[in-house]
Amino acid sequence: MTILVTGGAGYIGSHTVAELQRQGYDVVVFDNLEHGHREAVRGCPFILGDLLNPDDIGRAFDEHDIGGVIHFAAYVEVDESMRNPTKYFRNNVQGTVNLAAAMAEHGVKQIVFSSSCSVYGQPEVVPITEEESQKPESVYGVSKLMAEQVLRWFDVCHGLRHVALRYFNASGAAADGSLGDEYKPATRIIPVLMEYLLGQRPRFFINGDGYATPDGTCIRDYIHVDDLATAHVAALRYLAAGSPSAAFNLGTGQGYSNLEIVNTVRQITELDFEVEVGPRRPGDPPMVWADNRKARRELGWEPHYGLREIIEHAWRWHSSHPDGYGQGGP
Ligand SMILES: NC(=O)c1ccc[n+]([C@@H]2O[C@H](COP(=O)([O-])OP(=O)(O)OC[C@H]3O[C@@H](n4cnc5c(N)ncnc54)[C@H](O)[C@@H]3O)[C@@H](O)[C@H]2O)c1
């Protein structure tokens, strides 16, 4: 079966394309390369196109015999979404509408969608289950929830079944250092720390302390990007078996504080470095981690990597590709 991967030149998309290929799927990647990298897409057809242009996405279905879709293409920065909501609603919601419309028109009935734990906002209970109330606290989070709702109604109206995978904090890189996170400027703690260690930024800040956590810094659930990749293949199998539309949390089920991240980076890199405490970010919940039992049970998936491997692989990638794709490494 041929799978169309929107956003397949981006961070999580490129790792998932490699996993699909490992598991014998044919893949077609569709990306406008605004944040993606052509060099990250290997061994499959690549379509340079924009989801906001219905002709571009229609052409992908006209030219290839697509059996299912994995939809990563979106903007991903919470802070930017609050400064520019139009940009996020347009790309993340309208882009999903255009994709779903093209699928309905071409009779393609299965889609795996990149959603996010940000659809929950401040959780009432941790670990977070899929039944947690959905009160996103950012335009980005709302845009992901709206896209889930678009897909729900395309199921009701057109029989287009979906799996929404609500990722926690995607992190790490391919174990062999061949693929990794090249989102610029880095905004997530691990790539930001890596850039600091490589001398690419002068200082490193933790976003606030004094939270109600054991060491006072925020706790998050870091999930290895290759564990996310295997979950997408499991979700395709779930849909191919005729199972109904559903949402699944994808995390390890274990949280780590910002200081634990810093200390693990110190151990693995054997580098010592200064850490400063900056201001808190508005709306940052103190503790977020996933209850992943539904994904384990219904997708037959489980994460294989922990925090040490996430940081080992991220360091291998960043230190061998200080300027990203096209430089150094395999
Ligand atoms: N990184 C995380 O921790 C995280 C967490 C939760 C959810 N997600 C979701 O996962 C998905 C992938 O995130 P990522 O971290 O790999 O980001 P990324 O920016 O690396 O990848 C997104 C890709 O989509 C492409 N794209 C964006 N808009 C497009 C459009 N209109 N037409 C064609 N291509 C377009 C970009 O060029 C890029 O290659 C996103 O939907 C994001 O919301 C990410």
Image (cartoon, rainbow, N blue to C red):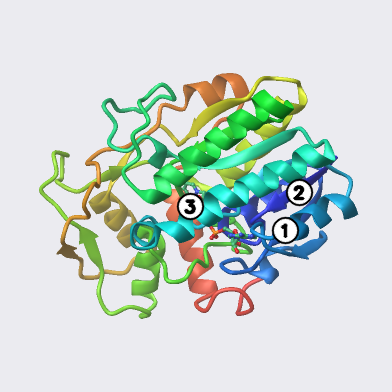
At numbered mark 2, what does the secondary structure look like: helix, strand or loop? strand
- Where residue 231 sits in the image (x, y, percent)? 61, 36
64 shown above or below 314 = above
User: Which residue type does callout 3 highlight?
Assistant: Phe
Marks 1 and 3, how far apart in space?
20 Å
At numbered mark 3, what does the secondary structure look like: helix, strand or loop? helix
**Which residue in the protein does label 1 denote?**
30
What is the count of numbered marks? Answer: 3
Q: Answer whether labels 1 and 3 touch (C-beta < 8 Å).
A: no
97 shown above or below 291 = below
- Where residue 249 sits in the image (x, y, percent)? 48, 32
**Which residue in the protein does label 3 denote?**
89
272 shown above or below 100 = below
**Ligand 1 falls in quadrant:** bottom right
User: Which residue type does callout 1 highlight?
Assistant: Phe
Report the residue that reaches farthest toward the left.
210
How many other residues sit within 10 Å of disc 2, few (<14), some (14-19) or many (≥20)?
many
Whether label 2 lies within 8 Å of ligand 1 gets the answer no
Q: Is residue 303 visible?
A: no
Marks 3 and 2, how far apart in space?
23 Å
At numbered mark 1, what does the secondary structure look like: helix, strand or loop? strand
User: Which residue type does callout 2 highlight?
Assistant: Leu
**Which residue in the protein does label 2 denote?**
4
Q: Is residue 102 visible?
A: yes
Whether label 1 lies within 8 Å of ligand 1 gets the answer yes
- Which callout, 3 or 2, points at the residue further toward the start of the chain? 2
- Which callout, 2 or 1, points at the residue further toward the start of the chain? 2
How many other residues sit within 10 Å of disc 1, few (<14), some (14-19) or many (≥20)?
many
Residue drawn 17% across and 39% down?
Answer: 213
The one nearer the camera, 195 or 75, is 75
From the viewer's perspective, tell me whether residue 186 is left or right of residue 164.
left
- Where residue 282 sits in the image (x, y, percent)? 21, 52
